[in-house]
Every structure is written in C-alpha cells, then in structure tokens.
Image (spheres, rainbow, N blue to C red):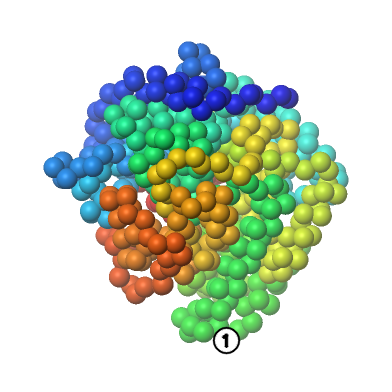
Amino acid sequence: MLLPVPMSNAAAAGATAAAGQSGIAWAPCEEEPAAECGTLTVPIDWSEPNGPAIDLAVARRKATDPAARIGSLVINPGGPGVSGVEAAYGAPGFFTEELQRRFDIVGFDPRGVGRSNPVICSASVYNQMPHTVMASQADFDAWNAFTRKLHKDCRARTGPLYDHVDSADVARDLDALRAALGEERLTYYGISYGTLIGQMYAELFPGRIRALALDSNMDHSLGVKGFLYTEAIAAEDGFDEFAAWCEADSSCVLHGRDIRAIWQDLLAKARRGELYYPGVTDRPMTELQVIYNGVLGNEGPDWRLLSEVINALAGGPLPDWLPPLPGRQPVAGEVAVLPTAVLCQDYNLRVRNYREYAALMRSSARLAPDMRYHPYPIDDMPICLNYPTTNPPHRLRYTGSAPLLLGSSLHDPATPYGWSANVARQLGPKAVLLTYEGWGHRIYGKDKCQTDIFDQYLISLAVPPPGTRCAVGTAETTLKRKPPAWPSSRLHWAAPAPRGGSAVRLQ
C-alpha cells in the first residue's frame, strides 16, 4: 500500500486555520457540570480539508481567576487511547491551584479515541486474537492471517478514519483546536504518548508555539529494534530499583527473601500453565501477564503493592487491594476498541517472519534477564502486521524559536529516560531537559521541584538552565490528593472507552 504524500507545512497551517475558524459551542458537560464540553469539526483526511469530517470531543475547566488568566492550556494524558476530555474533568486533582488560576485547562479526545470516533472492531473478530507472544513460525503465520482479517473488520467498523489516526494528523487537529480557542499560539502539556503529539506539532507548526511542556517523552526516531531493546532495558532497570528497595526496606513483604528467585519461579510456573491470578480460575496466567505486573508496579511506583502482589502469586496473603489482571483479554458486547492502531501508524513495528521476531525476543531477554521483555510493545507489535505506518519514524526537525521544556525521571519503566534525552538532542539548543532523579512514569506533581519548574515555564515562559536536575523530595507534594500509583485506569483492552463521569488519572 502506498503511503500518502505528507502535506507541506504551509498547506497544513492553512487547512487547520480554516477548520479552527468554526469555533466551539460550549455547554456544561453532562458528566461533569463544573466543566464545559463541545465539539470541533475536522476533516478525516487533512490533505482533503473539504472532504468527509468527524467531530472531536473537547472539554475545558475555565481559569479560576479570570483577571489573572493567560489563556488556554491544552493537555493530553497519553496512551494512545486515554481520554483528554476526562483528563480535563480530573484537572483539579492534578494541576496546581496556580496553574488552574491562570489557564483554562482544555482536554480533547484525539481522533480515534474515546468520544472522537473511536477505532472499533467487531468483538467476535477481536476475541479470536492469538496469544501475543509467539513461539513458532506457525504462531507467526496465524497472526499474519488474523491481522488481515482484523484490519479489514476494523476498517469496515470504524470507517475511513481507520487509516488517519497517526500523531501528525492529531497535531493538525490540535492546531485547529488552538485556532478555535482563539489562541494565537499554543500552550500545551502532554504526558507519554501525548508528547508525540506535541513533537509533531513542533515540526508542523513551529511558529505557533507559546509553550510546549513534554513530560516523559516518546522517541519517534526508533525502529523496531531500538524500540524493543530500550523498553526491555527500562523494564529491567525498574525491576532492579524495586529489588534494591525490597532488600533495604522492611516494609517490603518479601524483605530478606531472594526476590529474583521468587520472580523467576513465577515466570516458570506461568510458562507451564500452572499459575493462576487470585480470583481468576477459568484460565492460567501467562508469562506476559506476570511481567505486566512488574512494569505497572513501577509506573508510580507502588513498590509496596508490587511486593504484595508477587507474594500473593507465590502463595502468600492477598493485599488489601488487588489490581485487575493485566494483559489483553476477551471483551464483552458487540465491539472492541483498538487504540493500538495509533501506535501502528506512528511506529514501524512489523517483522518479516518468526525468525526475525525470535531474534528480537532473544536479544530482549539478554538485556532484561529478570523481566525478559517489555510487555507493552510485545502485546501491541503483532497487531501492527499488515498495517501501514503512515507517520514513519524520523528524527525531529524543529525550526521554531520558542524554547521547549522536556522532563523525565531517571527510572521511567514506560518511556525510558534515554528517549527524552534523545528527543532533547534532536531538538537542539531550543529544548531543555529537566531530569527528576527518581522513579516512575510522569514527573509533574511527584515533587515540588519539578512541578514548580513546569508551572514557571507554562506561566512565565521561564526555562531552567540546561542540565537542571530535581532530587527526590519528601512527602510534600503540590497535589491536593495523590492518585493511586498503580495505573490500572489506563489499561484499555478490557472494555470500550469509558462513558461515565469518572476522571482519568494523568499517570
């Protein structure tokens, strides 16, 4: 399949400005009356700005001090697949009071996500999905056949948008939103996959940036090897940090025991089909699901709960709160959501055959002897077979003059620190990387140091000196209430996108 010719920056700017002129009709949100909701109409294919269109769902919380208001702060919580609308609902529990005083906080569900024409497939087809960790050429052949069937079905279910959900398209939507909000230049905060939207915006609209704050960055220059290997290293680093804590802290229920031996025993039992998750008796856990727990417990991190989950799997008592069983599972109802389509269009994760796949897995296992591989890309990679990458990976090209702020923790198990460092190198002297000398995914709100720096940048456009680092602080935090550190709310594969009034946690 031929890839579409990308629009020029000038054409993109003209098209998005025209789309943004339509404005947004705001009204109290049905799910969260304290916020305002509306829709923004954008073309499905930005190369045909007058062609078929979709409505993007948008929500905002207005600045609490109109006299001090600077403008709109557009946010995206990542995923791909997490709702920006619900992130806006949850903004008071995440952003500082000063930031809420100064900005209307605006979130949108990106195209293909949540309330914005989600990518959907027939549940009857989705539930035929083979296990995502392949062990033979026969497994690869089964996936090769299944993805042809899956993508045909999803394309029919979703409509023409199915082939237009990459982050460059979302960046064009973002510029239309900027125009509709009446902002001359964009002020933006993105986490995780939301940083890729910001990076694409910087490339396409370099002169329309006021402030771009990118927290825990994706690296769009990576091929399949670089993606899998750096993720495996990050997963192993997180496990190493957890194990070191457990050895030193008596609050770890595994303190004084050989945690690595216990972990390896759980993996071996899972491979033999002998391990069951508490309360799930109809099917054994897979090795992939065991490894998922290891990464999810490091995202906050929530090491105490992780130690309790491992102990429970090894026959010990259950923790007070047991996270849901992770990993792709059968869905109920008529349709299943597939935000993985976004990843497939942004990254070329395809492999030619099982031999290539097995070589990648062996190398990952050498890099991560305890974790073996990172579960996120391994769970997604087979789905990208027989699906075009419409926004091919490349080094960033930013020609604007506005300084950009990037941030990352040293021990991020989801978007490795090296990704943010590499993005900063690609952006050059106009980008400053803020390093949090701690753990977990997302650094805003974890300690006062980096939270203040992000706020100062977004409010006053003040960037810290190059090489600025924030040490791990005390229990003091700028958050009113700290969200749970185990990010189960971001596991998108078990049900369609939420439609209730619960706020998304910005992890």
Closer-to-camera residue (426/346): 426
Give the side of residue 275 with respect to residue 403, left or right.
Answer: right
Q: Residue at x 34, y 20 (%)?
A: 21
Q: Residue furthest left?
A: 67
Label 1: which residue? 256
Give the side of residue 335 with respect to residue 2, left or right.
Answer: left
Residue 265: image quadrant is: bottom right
Closer-to-camera residue (288/447): 447
Q: Amino acid at mark 1?
A: Gly
Is 354 drawn above or below residue 111 in the view shown?
A: below
Residue 448: image quadrant is: bottom left
Q: Residue at x 28, y 23 (%)?
A: 25
Circle 1 crowding by C-alpha within 10 Å: few under 14, some 14–19, many from 20: few
Residue 394 makes an appearance in the image: yes
Q: Position of residue 119 (x, y in %)?
A: 55, 31
Q: Quadrant of the N terminus?
A: top right
Residue 85: image quadrant is: top left
Q: Quadrant of the C terminus?
A: bottom left
